[in-house]
Image (cartoon, helix red, strand yellow):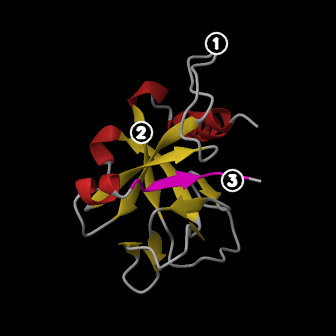
Amino acid sequence: YFTQAFTTGAAQNFARRYTIPIDTLVFDFDMPQDQQPVAKPENGVYCYGLFLEGCKWDWSEWELAESDLKVLYVSVPLLWILPCKKAELRKFPWYDCPLYKVSTRKGVLSTTGHSTNFVMPIKLRSSHPESHWVKRGVAMLTQLDA
């Protein structure tokens, strides 16, 4: 499964729908309060099944929080990946959380120029500075080790 093709497809659909150049788009991210949507989003895509390592999601504050003791991985809430123009990117306190395919956090560049492991950074709400989460090694994973 080539995850970058999935996100590129979402960006292409958005660019074609609104007839704007794809190279002017970036991704915005949100965790919808409705975690059981009954319809697809008008723009972008929903993504579920991801995991957080090194922290947890605080369901009451709706932001990143410290891990519970002896809990290595937690499920990520439903994620809305939303293409938008760079100038229209929402501003809020966030952590640019790296998303990896597997927990080894290393990969090589493939012939397409993409890493074989790193997928993309995901903006997650946080009241702590980015350095707080970097020191804890916080990352998102598409799958857990077997």
Report x, y in % for residue 124. Answer: 40, 60
Main SS, magenta region, reads loop
Q: Name the residue located 26 percent from the left edge and 55 percent from the top edge.
A: 130
Residue nearer the viewer, 43 or 112: 112
Q: Which residue is mark 1?
A: 111
Residue 116 seen in this snapshot? yes
Q: In this picture, is 125 found above or below 35?
A: above
* Quarter of the rendering containing residue 101: top right
Q: Which residue is mark 2?
A: 26
Task: Give the residue type that dot 1 points to.
Answer: Thr
Task: Give the residue type that dot 2 points to.
Answer: Val
- How crowded is the residue under tag 3: few (<14 C-alpha within 10 Å), some, or many (20+)? few
The answer to which of marks 2 and 3 sits earlier in the sequence is 2
* Mark 2 vs mark 3, CA separation in Å: 24 Å
Task: Give the residue type that dot 3 points to.
Answer: Gln
Contact (Cβ within 8 Å) of mark 3 with mark 1: no
Q: In this picture, is 14 found above or below 108?
A: below
Front disc: 3 or 1: 3
Q: Name the residue located 64 percent from the left edge and 51 percent from the top edge.
A: 142
Residue nearer the viewer, 138 or 90: 138
Queried whether the magenta region covers residue 139, the answer comes back as yes
The answer to which of marks 3 and 1 sits earlier in the sequence is 1
Front disc: 2 or 1: 1
The span shown in magenta is 137-145
